[in-house]
Image (tube, rainbow, N blue to C red):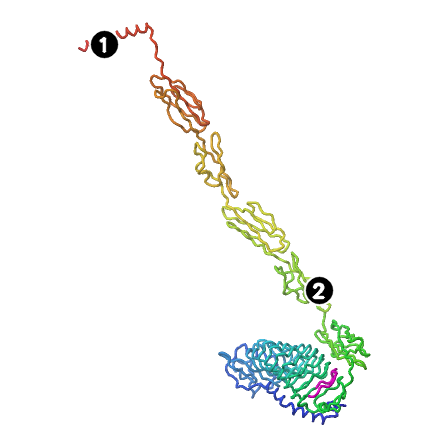
Amino acid sequence: MSRHEHLFSPNAAPKRASALAALVARSGQALAAITAVLSISVAAPATAQISSAERAVLVSLYNGTNGASWTNTTAPNAVWTVAASPGGECAWFGVVCAPSGSSNSVVEINLPSNNLAGALPASLNTLSNLRFLRLQSNSISGALPSFTGLNNLSYVDVRSNQLTGSLPSLAGLTSLEAFSFSGNQIAGQIPSLTGLTALKVFQGSNNLLSGNIPSLTGLSALEWFHVDSNQLSGALPSLSGLSSLQSFYASNNALTGALPSLSGLTALRFFRADANQITGTLPSLAGLNALEVFFVRNNQIAGAVTPVPAPTNALAAGLSALCPNQLTVSAVAAWDAATGSTPWSTGCVAPRTAQTLAFGAAPLLLVSGTATVAATASPAPGSSASVSYTSLTPSICSVNASSGLVTALAGGVAGSVCTIAADKAGDASFNSAPQVTQSMTLVVPINGVCGSANGVASFVAPSANLCASGTASAVTSTVSQFSWSCAGLNTGTTSSCTAPRQYNVTASAGANGTLICATPIIGSNTSTCTATPSAGYRTLSISGCGGTTTAAGVNTYTTAAITADCTVAASFEQVVVGACGSANGVATVLAPSANLCAAGTASAVTSGASSFTWTCAGAGGGSPASCAAPRNYTVTASFAGLIGNGSITPTGPQSVTAGSTISFTIAVGPGQILRSVGGTCGGTLTGTTYVTSAITGDCTVLVAFDAAPIPTMSPALLALLGLMLASAVGMFGRRRLNWK
């Protein structure tokens, strides 16, 4: 038995006490430093009232941790008067306030060893000015609340409680100097420490932490980092650049890989990485003049032993350990003194091949059910020993040591965790495989049940409320519906879920009317639209969304099956009834070209024998009007032969309505006779009146006069005339005599 092993044997109490006393003596300053870092400044309590929100947090803390049974909140100590009216909270035991604006704000909560039992309130992170939180050595259970938003938080000490769950995120806590949570049951991974440039102390020993140790790069202020006695795996992080690091503890985990370089860590005093699965060689200790403890036993480190720190060896006597490992044996007196064993290599063996175990995927373990676990060795088959299984939770499950058949026991309920360990002993050729564990949470079958999105029509694929229970699949889309499934858990049944898919039908109406369409519409259905034209208008057309364009005057419309958002458009036109203009009924010689229509659109004017005709077409379904103007012709009277001794009245061109006649009066001058009346108009002469035929075109009336002929007298007539003349003379003479 080595000198170092003697220190931890039952029969070495005096020797162990002496060595430990030396360790305490050498580490006293370091322990004092931790105490100083985690200590809380004593400030005079502020008396101004805090906000109602902060008071509510304190009340929740009191009620949630059985404040009535706290040790130091009864007289003569400052009582937490949570049931009284607000005010005086800053004088409560363990509460320190500081001015914040017009009021006070809680900056410290100091309740160590105060019999707190229960969970911390989730609202703790609303104390935005909180700097110190000291709750160590109580019976606090549950998980730590979120620290997000506590940008002023400097010190957290929750050691020696009953905390479970996982660690909250520390991102953004740039003021954090100390975070100590050792001696709890906190599981899960260590959160990222990147950016915590003020961090000096990180203590998480004796928990259930798993996963890798996060990067420590950039934490230049870090002095103490303790994560020993957990379930951490993976390689040790780089310690390069951590010039302030004094103590690094990572013992009793499942860490692998090589030890990190310790070069440049001139402040390092304590380094422990024992009881892991570390391989590789020992790092150089040159220049580590402050190093007192170097403890790396119970690993698989090989190669030559490294020299003790030079030029100054500060290693405490008997407080370092290198074996058992697979180091090459050599005589080094300085290591004999540092380990307290002569020779230092006692317990080290020749290098053997390392072997590891790895579990396959964790099987499903139902309440009161069975499952089989299996761990395989690498390299296979490894040592001659068989893999042996044990239950680390015997009240919840048992396991067959050789077959790996796990049985959930009556004490296990849903949510209970069954943990099985696998071991494989070494032999002359192989090291023992580090123990590995596999945990299974006992479950009950959970049937998949559709959530509230099931059956609810939606424009887009639903993304929330898909399942009331179970695991939702991806949502698939068809024209008419969205579909997904809610897979049961733990062999539970699966439900199929759907939501009708709907689309918007947008109604777009032009001027002088409205259009209303049924919307939204479930996919593959049709929408009916109704147009309402304004007074004096009619619907010209309706079209869109795949339907057939309507004819003018149709006010209803049905789309095709709707498969996407679409638009139906309607246009309207004015209803115009044709009306004849002022040219209607007015006789004219020429075809009218103006004032044809009072309303509507005039057609071309058609010339008939008796009238001019045209139409005034309506619009928008309005009726047309038929229009006409009597047609006039020109009748011109003219002369042939002598003119001066006769006349025809009226003279000049005369306008005569088609189908009518016109009368002319003919006068014959002295010494003339009417020779003829005629022309192109036709007609009849009665006495001195000439009446034309019915006029059917422009025509001319021609009248011709001739000189009257001189008559020739016979002798008898001449004799008669002579007698008559003589008689007349005689009568004249007698009358003359009578006058006298």
Labelled disc at residue 368: none
Judging depth in this view, the residue of 30 and 489 nearest the camera is 30
Give the answer, above or below, for where 598 lies relative to 532. Answer: above
Q: Kindly identify the amino acid type of the residue bearing the numbered disc 1.
A: Phe
Give me the C-alpha separation between circle 2 and circle 1: 160 Å
Sequence-wise first label, 2 or 1: 2
Q: In the figure, 379 relative to 717: above or below?
A: below
Residue identifier under label 1: 732
Magenta range is: 295-308
Residue 180 is situated, as x and y percent measured from the top left of the image, at 63, 82
Mark 1, Cα crowd under 10 Å, few <14 / some 14-19 / many 20+, is few
Q: Please, what secondary structure does the residue beneath circle 1 have?
A: helix
Q: Which mark is residue 494?
A: 2
* Residue 79 screen position, x and y as percent: 56, 85
Location of the C terminus (image quadrant): top left
**Residue 227 vs residue 500, the one in the foreground:** 227
At 81% from the left and 82% from the top, the residue drawn is 428
